Amino acid sequence: MKLSTKHLLGIKDLTVEDVNLFLDTAAQFKEVLQRPVKKVPSLRDVTIVNLFFENSTRTRISFELAEKRLSADTINFTASGSSVSKGETLLDTVNNILSMKVDMVVMRHSASGAPHFLAQHIPAAIVNAGDGVNEHPTQGLLDAFSIKEKMGTLKGVKVAIIGDIMHSRVAMSNIYLLKKMGTEITVCGPPTLIPKYLKEAFDVNVSYNLTQTLNWCDVANVLRIQLERQNQVLFSSLREYNLSYGISRRLLESLNKDIVIMHPGPINRGVELDSDVADSGQSIILQQVENGVAVRMAVLYLLSNKNN
Ligand code: NCD
């Protein structure tokens, strides 16, 4: 099996076969990660640069670890402390790095479309680690992997995506992916944080009522309020957001079933999720982080073309 794409820029343009290949390969790498020796030689002669123009904890560490587990050579670049602050363009920065014979680029950037732009100008394979409010494809894949692992399938599972949909690249990659795989989706949050075009354009349910949505779903993927991306007031206060859309233990106990709680991190405890929910047995938040390494190993391995 081969991917239909040279880069992973987003979930939008992947085929169902691509998604299945990523998820099946990730399952094999997850097995490797359970062994006493967690390392394979698959990318021994491959050099990967991690270009992070925007803050990251989980995603950056997860990619680095995936690369090390595959025996790749890696270089880490963070925008602060680089010549970007001296006015160097994105293309110049990347071309300088590539002239040192780098095979793959993992990039996070605050501008939507930055990795798509690079893909038109450089020969290396590019993995999008989050671009602006557009997509975060490896998060979409690891979320799908985690849902499938927990529920046994993606088809027909009822997934609620809750919170700041408008500013969330995680929501977009989840919606593209889960729609392809036959999952039922409801997005839920305050009307000001859900784009008006979403229902028509993506054929998802939209709800402004948290309790109804939680009673409907099998899995709730809860998102962070992205205050850094909001330049206008879209809800009155974090406290009021918590009262209307925050998930508390009391709310979960009032439901007619046990649902699975997910969150891509970083969590704003006491805003979208209360601590006793985030840390409860219903939460698979840390399993998502664990699965992220296996999923990123699969992405890097498949895009490196070493499987031919
Ligand atoms: C997300 C991101 O950066 O898009 N986090 C992540 O990669 N795990 C979500 C967020 O910042 O809220």
Image (cartoon, rainbow, N blue to C red):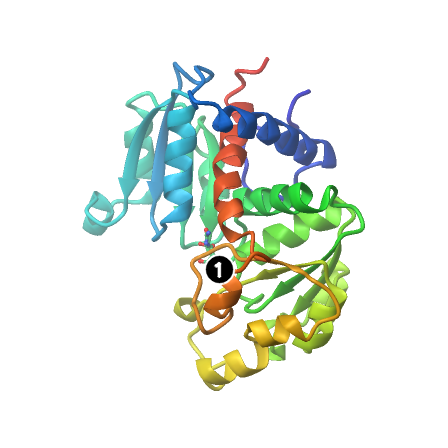
Task: Name which quarter of the figure residue 60 lies in.
Answer: top left
On screen, residue 95 versus residue 16, left or right, reads: left
Q: Nearer the viewer, residue 49 or 96?
A: 49
Give the residue at x 35% y 40%.
51
Q: Which residue is mark 1?
A: 279
142 left or right, relative to 256: left
Q: Is residue 247 visible?
A: no
Q: Quadrant of the N terminus?
A: top right
Residue at image position (56%, 56%) is: 281
Residue 168: % across, % down: 53, 61
- Residue 85 in the image: state x and y as whole percent: 21, 51
Q: Based on the displayed image, in which of its 4 quarters is residue 192 positioned?
A: bottom right
In the image, is 14 to the left or to the right of 231?
right
Amino acid type, label 1? Asp
Mark 1 CB near ligand 1 (8 Å cut)? no
Query: Where is 285 relative to 304, above or below?
Result: below
Q: Looking at the image, which residue is at 59% across and 47% down?
A: 143
